[in-house]
């Protein structure tokens, strides 16, 4: 087990330059700024909000995203995340959790227990008639009489989970759900993961509108609404969430809109690449250490490789960028090593020996904060002077 689980509190009051490396650093003021910005947009529109807890995976970050109970619903992708949030249920600031993967038989006992033992409302995700069948079978086998509230997942172009509006399977799922005593249609849900390709506000607004139109079209197929008092249309992804204030739409009667987003407290190079957030909006950094310098090839080696960073990219080349010199990128990685290389203009090329030395601590912006954050057992939370003020322990596992 990582030694940081035993030593992390000893670094409170110390500088990030004193941290063992590699280390994950969170700027709390940036997290709060990012969260407040989205909360303000949601409030202006008067719509619902459901944060996804997958990025920072901590009770502290979740409490901030929920505004300490102003918002009372979350999305979680793992049972571990739901268990981690149970103290917030006990505190009375969390009421409902959407399990964000299409439901499968092996999780139903646990999901049912979250409701029966902890009084947490669990909402499911379905996109196949077999999902309705396994819920019928579970309720029959266990004697559960309450129907499972379920979002029907609509695919609006991400090609991950969900059903295209043009697919006859959408009607099949709706009909199966309406005919089942084990399911209550809660609403329609989509996630525009492809919105990460947005480069302008107009492009992001267009994706958001496509999302809304997608779930509206799907909801029109729902002939029998007698099982639900209202239908929730849940849309969003962090890039489109940043332009939610641009959304203006009259919704049908008996329909409410909610926004979901997960990465927004943290942000990363992928988000900066959309043009909708700035470098200063990134709350996550990795602190690493220079292990060697190679003037003959103008590169330096650090002790942060693929399992300390990520394996994803964006329009920013490389897997991470040096916060003190954005034209120095991690251009190659192995498991535990990363290679700094110059990626800026050749005419302005800097010599590696003038920028790096053995033992130097370097801070890195990473490409995908969700993946990077999941690698660490401790998150060092710093103030605006980069002094560690708190340590957060993320939920690990599935």
Image (tube, rainbow, N blue to C red):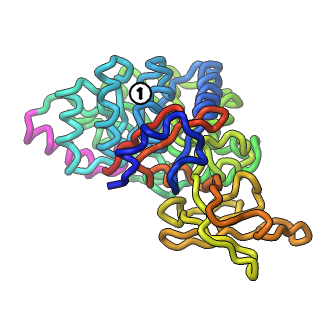
Residue designated by label 1: 73
Query: Residue 56, how many percent across, how many down?
Result: 47, 41
Q: Which residues are magenta?
A: 125-143
* Image: 192 above or below 66: below
Quarter occupied by residue 16: top right
Quarter occupied by residue 350: bottom right
- Does the image show residue 212? no
Q: Quadrant of the N terminus?
A: bottom left
Q: Is residue 143 rendered to the left or right of residue 129?
A: left
Closer to us: 386 or 139 = 386
Query: Residue 196, how many percent across, how many down?
Result: 63, 51
Query: Residue 289, how many percent across, how many down?
Result: 59, 60
Q: Residue at x 86, y 67 (%)?
A: 345
Q: Residue furthest right?
A: 347
Q: Residue at x 76, y 56 (%)?
A: 325
Q: Secondary structure at mark 1?
A: strand
Mark 1 residue crowding within 10 angstroms, few (<14) / some (14–19) / many (20+): many
* Secondary structure predominantly adopted by residues drawn in magenta: helix
Magenta run includes residue 140: yes
Query: Residue 302, how many percent across, how many down?
Result: 59, 66
Magenta run includes residue 386: no
Q: Residue at x 49, y 54 (%)?
A: 371
Q: Is residue 298 rendered to the left or right of residue 358?
A: right
Q: Is residue 247 rendered to the left or right of residue 310?
A: right
């Amino acid at each position: 087990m990582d030694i940081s689980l035993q030593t992390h509190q000893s670094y409170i009051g110390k500088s990030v330059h004193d941290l063992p490396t590699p280390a994950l650093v969170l700027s709390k003021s940036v997290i709060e700024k990012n969260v407040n910005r989205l909360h303000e947009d949601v409030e202006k529109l008067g719509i619902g909000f459901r944060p996804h807890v997958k990025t920072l995976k901590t009770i502290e970050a979740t409490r901030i995203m929920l505004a300490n109970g102003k918002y009372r619903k979350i999305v979680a992708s793992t049972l571990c995340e739901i268990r981690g949030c149970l103290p917030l249920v006990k505190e009375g600031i969390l009421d409902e959790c959407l399990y964000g993967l299409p439901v499968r038989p092996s999780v139903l006992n646990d999901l049912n227990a979250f409701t029966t033992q902890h009084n947490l409302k669990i909402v499911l995700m379905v996109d196949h008639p077999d999902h309705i069948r396994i819920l019928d079978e579970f309720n029959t086998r266990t004697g559960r009489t309450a129907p499972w509230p379920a979002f029907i997942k609509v695919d609006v172009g991400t090609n991950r989970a969900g059903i295209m509006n043009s697919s006859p399977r959408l009607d099949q799922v709706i009909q199966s759900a309406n005919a089942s005593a084990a399911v209550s249609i809660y609403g329609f849900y989509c996630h525009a993961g492809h919105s990460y390709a947005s480069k302008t506000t107009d492009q992001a607004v267009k994706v958001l509108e496509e999302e809304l139109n997608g779930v509206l079209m799907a909801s029109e197929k729902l002939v029998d609404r007698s099982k639900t008092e209202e239908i929730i249309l849940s849309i969003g992804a962090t890039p489109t969430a940043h332009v939610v204030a641009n959304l203006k739409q009259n919704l049908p009667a008996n329909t409410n809109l909610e926004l979901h987003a997960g990465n927004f407290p943290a942000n990363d190079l992928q988000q900066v690449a959309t043009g909708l957030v700035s470098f200063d909006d990134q709350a996550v950094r990795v602190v690493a250490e220079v292990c060697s310098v190679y003037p003959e090839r103008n590169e330096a080696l650090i002790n942060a490789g693929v399992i300390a960073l990520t394996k994803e990219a964006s329009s920013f080349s490389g897997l991470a960028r040096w916060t003190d010199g954005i034209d120095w990128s991690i251009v190659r990685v192995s498991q535990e090593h990363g290679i700094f290389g110059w990626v800026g203009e050749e005419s302005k090329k800097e010599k590696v020996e003038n920028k790096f030395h053995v033992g130097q601590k370097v801070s890195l912006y990473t490409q995908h904060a969700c993946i990077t954050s999941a690698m660490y057992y401790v998150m060092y939370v710093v103030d605006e002077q980069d002094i560690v003020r708190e340590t957060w322990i993320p939920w690990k596992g599935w």
